[in-house]
Amino acid sequence: MRKGKHNNSRLFIIFIIFISILSFYITRIIFLQTYKSQYLSKLAHKQHSVVLELKPQRGDILDRNYRKLALDHSVYSVFAAPRKISADRKDSVAQALSKVLGLDKGLVLSRIEKDKAFVWIKRELDKDLSDAVEALNIDGVELLKEYKRFYPKGSLASHIIGFAGLDDTGLEGVELEYDSYLKGSPGWRWTVRDAKRRNIFSGDVKSIPPSEGLNVILTIDETIQHIAERELEKVFEKYRAKSASIIIMDPHTGEILALANRPTFDLNDFSRSTKDQMRNRAVTDLYEPGSVFKIVTASCAIENRAVELDQEFFCENGKYRVGGRILHDHKPYATLTFREIFEKSSNIGVTKVAEVLGRDEIYKFSRLFGFGDLTGIDLPGEAVGILRPPREWSAVSISAVPIGQEVGVTSIQLVTAVSAIANGGRLLRPHIVKEIRNANGDLIKAFSLQESKRVLSRESAKIIRDILKGVVENGTGRNAKADSYTTAGKTGTAQKIESGGGYSHSKFVASFLGFAPAESPKIAIIVSLDEPRPVYYGGLVSAPVFRNVAVDVLRYLNVPADKAKEETRI
């Protein structure tokens, strides 16, 4: 009897335990299904689903004739999934990868020891390296297709094109300014893997393809760019200049046909270049322009009808006191006509013209020509320049500003200003990009001519063109005279300001600013050299570069000669 009661008690206890366990699991199942289902579902999805970003191909950069200057080509990058590599394998994996990739073993090991699902080992491998990694067949180490930026012309137009970084993000030049067009949008691919991280075929796998970047077509011409860089390199080396810049612009459209600086750098090896080599001086660097700025004073006088072309000014035989300052000419002149003042680049003559005009008019026309403001060129880093209002002028400023002192300008401002004279009086916004097109060649966006404002009447512009033609024919710009084409322009030899104040007697900026053909201009050009030596006059250093570039570019553009060939080059 007692034995039966004992068995019943034991059965009852087992039953209670069984019911308790069953209740616990039922409760747990209800809890998980009701309250934790969403969390667990997400967790499972995270563990078994892999999302891979599909990088878009960056758009090409091409010249105006659709010749490629920047493009992407496919490469492979190696990455690891550290959680897939067991602890006992990590050392051997690091050894194998470091040997093939030429990396430090400790560096590789430190990466694969991280508690992460994904780490980069090395980016942008060439074909031999990627094949070697693939041949290792290491579980947990894979290759991913990417794109590497390539610049087929090396250093050509480097300061225009700029460059993109490792992640295909623009860092300088057009690559930076038009990055939103070039970079495209990434795509995504979802794949499902089992507990051993093997891909499972499923109709539920989804993929969104990347949106490829758009192509950017520049206004520059590769051939014209080559001509400009060839001549700039020659003069840069010959005169051992600190730096040099050249810009060629279509004065009727504002399109930049070429822009170059020295020193320069290789776009395919930009990481080895210095900031000094990469700086786009034609757009970012300020300097006192010297006599090339006299085109503003001449324009102001003609537009205001303040002087006559044959009106005479006494140039004080080379010395003239203004506000306690003695102003000198490079040669002593007695009496010069208004035209001769600019042909011979008399500082005293220009100052006397400016005194007739007054400081307010000089300032007004300087502003009209865009000085003291951005030109709006579509390149990063443009400098505004320096142009103080008349209320801040000193007693000597009336003899300084009109001859290009006490002002800071950029080369892009100067070539934009002279283009206004060349095209009949319209100040245009310079631009470097012509069109945006997709991979199929369809036009997405065109950048048409943008007229900013009229700064001169056509009649005044024609008179100034004739004066600047005289500078080449009879004055300081004789070395800009060409065999087959009439040319016009202005020389500039500007003293640099010393660090302690005052003008240097050994450091100069030599420049020539002009256009050709003189009567019907097709191109405007600025050539500027910083600290050329031993020769430093703009008429001797920069004018010949202008001539050589103008002749070759006009011939390339099939512009008919407008001058008898028997006229010799000086």
Image (cartoon, rainbow, N blue to C red):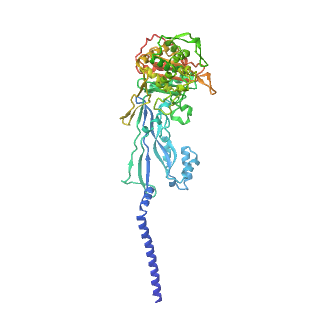
Residue 459, by quadrant, is top left
Find residue 287 and report its image quarter.
top right
Taking 404 as reference, is 37 left or right?
left
Foreground pick, 100 / 179: 179
- Residue lying furthest bottom: 1
The residue positioned 43% from the left and 65% from the top of the image is 32
Q: Residue furthest front?
A: 391
User: In this orientation, does residue 239 appear?
Assistant: no
Where is residue 340 drawn, in percent x and y? 51, 12
Total marks drawn? 0
Residue at image x 53%, y 56%?
86
| In this view, 466 is above or below 92 | above
Please tell me whether residue 547 is drawn above or below residue 179 in the rendered image: above
Point out residue 312 in the picture as x, y percentages from the top left corner. 51, 10
Give the x, y percent position of residue 103: 56, 44
From what the image shows, is residue 201 above or below residue 178?
below
Return the residue nearer the eye: 362 or 544.
Answer: 362
| Residue 420 seen by the camera | yes
Between residue 411 and residue 119, name the one nearer to us.
411
Which of these two is toward me, 2 or 107?
Answer: 2
On the image, the x and y values in percent for residue 5 come to 46, 86
In the displayed structure, 150 sits above or below 140; it is: above
